[in-house]
Image (tube, helix red, strand yellow):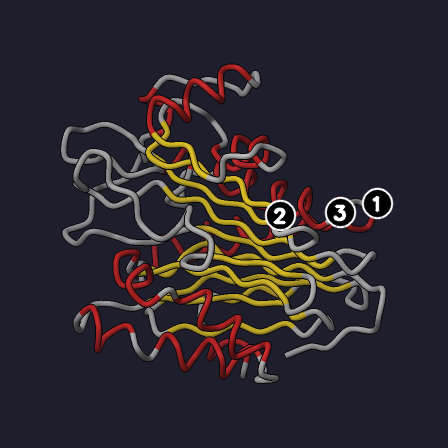
C-alpha cells in the first residue's frame, strides 16, 4: 500500500481475475506493464484521470491475452458482445456500453458517452452511437481470442483507476464476456456501483470476477461506503470479496483495485490470478504482479 502527497498522480490497472495458466504469465505481466505505460504517459504529461484510464484500458483491449476487445470470448451463438464502463469522479458522469459488437475499443465508446444524458447504451443502440461518433469498426472475427477455449467460463475483466495531478479520480472497466454466455448477457462491468465507481470525495474502484455475483452484491458501492467510513482500501476490498463464494457459490471469486482521494493505492483478490500493475509519481518504474503474495515477498 502506497500513500501519495497532495497533487501527485497515481495509476493502478488490472488484467482480470482468472484461473492460473502458466503459459500466459509472461503475456499477462507484459500486458499490464504496457497498460501502465500508456496511462503514465497521460499523467506525466499533465493529462487527466479519465484519459489515463481510457489509454490504459484501450491498450489491454488491443492485446489478445486479455478478455476484452481483441481477446473477447464468443457467446453461445459464436458472436462477440463486449461491455465497458467509465466514470469521472469530478462530476459523477458515467458512460457505458453493453453487448456492443464490432468496435475495436469499447472503452473509447464509453468515454464518448460521458457528456451525454444517457448512462448506458446496449447492443444495436450502442453500435449506432459508436458509428455516429466515428469509432473504429472491426470485423467480428478480429475480436475473437486466438487461444484454446477453456473448460470453464472465464469471467475476467480488465480495469483501471487513476488519480491525476489535479486530484481528479476516474475508474473504468472493459470485458469480452463469458465463453458461451447467452446472447445479450450483461454482467457487472458496465454498471456503476457494481463493477466500478469513482468519486473525487472518496476514491475509485474497479473489479473483475464473477459478474453476476458482483452485480448481486453491488460490490463497488460496498467498497466505496467502507472507504467513506475511513477503512483502508485493501481490507475494504478483501472484506467484500469474501462475500462472493457465500453468495454465488464456491467458484465465485474476483479481485479489485482502488485509489483513495488522498492517493492511497490498494488491491486484493481471492481468485487464483489477478494481474495488477501500479505506479505513482514518486516511483522510477512501475510494479507488476500476478498475485498478491508476489508483492509481499
- Tell me if 259 is positioned left or right of 153 in this view: right
Instruction: Provide the residue designation for mark 2.
Output: 53
Which comes before the other along the chain, label 3 or label 2? 3
Residue appearing at x 41%, y 50% in the figure: 191
Q: Decide if residue 34 is in sight here.
A: no
Which comes before the other along the chain, label 1 or label 2? 1
Q: Which mark is residue 48?
A: 3
Image quadrant assignment for residue 140: top left
Instruction: Provide the residue designation for mark 1.
Output: 45
Query: In the figure, 209 relative to 136: above or below?
Result: below
- Tell me if 225 is positioned left or right of 281 in this view: left
Image quadrant assignment for residue 238: bottom left
Choose between 57 and 111: the one closer to the eye.
Answer: 111
Query: In the figure, 241 relative to 160: above or below?
Result: below
Image quadrant assignment for residue 244: bottom left
Query: In the figure, 107 relative to 33: above or below?
Result: above
Task: State yes or no: discs 3 and 2 in contact (Cβ < 8 Å).
Answer: no
Amino acid at each position: 500500500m502506497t500513500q501519495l502527497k497532495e497533487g501527485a498522480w497515481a495509476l493502478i490497472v488490472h488484467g482480470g481475475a482468472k484461473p492460473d495458466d502458466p503459459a500466459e504469465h509472461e503475456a499477462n505481466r507484459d500486458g499490464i506493464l504496457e497498460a501502465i505505460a500508456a496511462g503514465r504517459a497521460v499523467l506525466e504529461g499533465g493529462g487527466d484521470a479519465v484519459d489515463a484510464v481510457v489509454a490504459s484500458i484501450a491498450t489491454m483491449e488491443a492485446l489478445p491475452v486479455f478478455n476484452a476487445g481483441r481477446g473477447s470470448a464468443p457467446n453461445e451463438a459464436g458472436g462477440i458482445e463486449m461491455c465497458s464502463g467509465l466514470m469521472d469522479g469530478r462530476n459523477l458522469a458515467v458512460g457505458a456500453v453493453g453487448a456492443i459488437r464490432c468496435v475495436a475499443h469499447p472503452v473509447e465508446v464509453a468515454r464518448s458517452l460521458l457528456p451525454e444524458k444517457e448512462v448506458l447504451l446496449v447492443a444495436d443502440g450502442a453500435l449506432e452511437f459508436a458509428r455516429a461518433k466515428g469509432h473504429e469498426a472491426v470485423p467480428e472475427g478480429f475480436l475473437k481470442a486466438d487461444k484454446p477455449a477453456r473448460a470453464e467460463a472465464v469471467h475476467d475483466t480488465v480495469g483501471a483507476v487513476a488519480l491525476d495531478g489535479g486530484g481528479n479520480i476516474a475508474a473504468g472497466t472493459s470485458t469480452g464476456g463469458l465463453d458461451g454466455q447467452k446472447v445479450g448477457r450483461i454482467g457487472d462491468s458496465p454498471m456503476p456501483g457494481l463493477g466500478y465507481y469513482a468519486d473525487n470525495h472518496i476514491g475509485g474502484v474497479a473489479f473483475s470476477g464473477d459478474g453476476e455475483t458482483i452485480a448481486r452484491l453491488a460490490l463497488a458501492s460496498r467498497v466505496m461506503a467502507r472507504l467513506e467510513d475511513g477503512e483502508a482500501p485493501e481490507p475494504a476490498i478483501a472484506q467484500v470479496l469474501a462475500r462472493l463464494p457465500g453468495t454465488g457459490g464456491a467458484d465465485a471469486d474476483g479481485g479489485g483495485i482502488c485509489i483513495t482521494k488522498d492517493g492511497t493505492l490498494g488491491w486484493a483478490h481471492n481468485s487464483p490470478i489477478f494481474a495488477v500493475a501500479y505506479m505513482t509519481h514518486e516511483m522510477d518504474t512501475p510494479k507488476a504482479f500476478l498475485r498478491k503474495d508476489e508483492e509481499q515477498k
